[in-house]
Amino acid sequence: MDEAEFVDRVADKADLDKPLAEKSVRAVFHTLKEQITPGEVEDLAAQLPKKLKIMWLES
């Protein structure tokens, strides 16, 4: 699944428009990254598809 599909799924599940869904995903990613170790951040990133990985790392 790429970034666009992930955001689309969040938008559908949460009944949000796409810009708000993307903002929400980035906020959740940022919050999660604050709660785990840098090593875990990298481990998780390594398992994501390229475009979703970029979104994760930029959040």
Image (cartoon, rainbow, N blue to C red):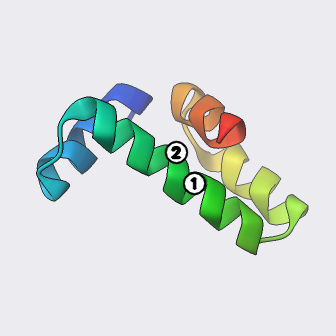
Question: Is 21 displayed left or right of 44 in the figure?
Answer: left
Residue positioned 58% across, 43% down in the render: 48
Regarding mark 1 in the picture, which secondary structure is present there?
Answer: helix
Whether 40 is drawn above or below 7: the answer is below
- Indicate the quadrant containing the C terminus: top left, top right, bottom left or bottom right: top right
The one of 42 and 19 positioned closer to us in this rendering: 19
Question: Is 19 displayed left or right of 40 in the figure?
Answer: left
Quickly name the residue at label 2: 26
Distance, label 2 to label 1, CA atoms, is 5 Å
Residue positioned 85% across, 69% down in the render: 37
Whether 31 is drawn above or below 8: the answer is below
- Indicate the quadrant containing the N terminus: top left, top right, bottom left or bottom right: top left
| Percent position of residue 22, x then y | 38, 37
> Are there few (<14), some (14-19), or many (20+) residues within 10 Å of tag 1?
some
Question: Is 37 displayed left or right of 19 in the figure?
Answer: right
| Percent position of residue 43, x then y | 77, 56
Badge 1 amino acid: Phe
| Disc number for residue 11 | none
Residue positioned 80% across, 51% down in the render: 42
The answer to whether the residue labelled 2 contacts the one labelled 1, judged by CB atoms less than 8 Å apart, is yes
Q: Inspect this view and state whether residue 2 appears.
A: no
Q: Quadrant of residue 11?
A: top left
Residue positioned 15% across, 56% down in the render: 13
Badge 2 amino acid: Arg
Q: Inspect this view and state whether residue 4 appears.
A: yes
Q: Quadrant of residue 41?
A: bottom right
> Are there few (<14), some (14-19), or many (20+) residues within 10 Å of tag 2?
some
| Percent position of residue 45, x then y | 69, 46
Quickly name the residue at label 1: 29
The one of 5 and 20 positioned closer to us in this rendering: 20
Q: How many marks?
A: 2
Residue that protrudes farthest toward the bottom in the picture? 35
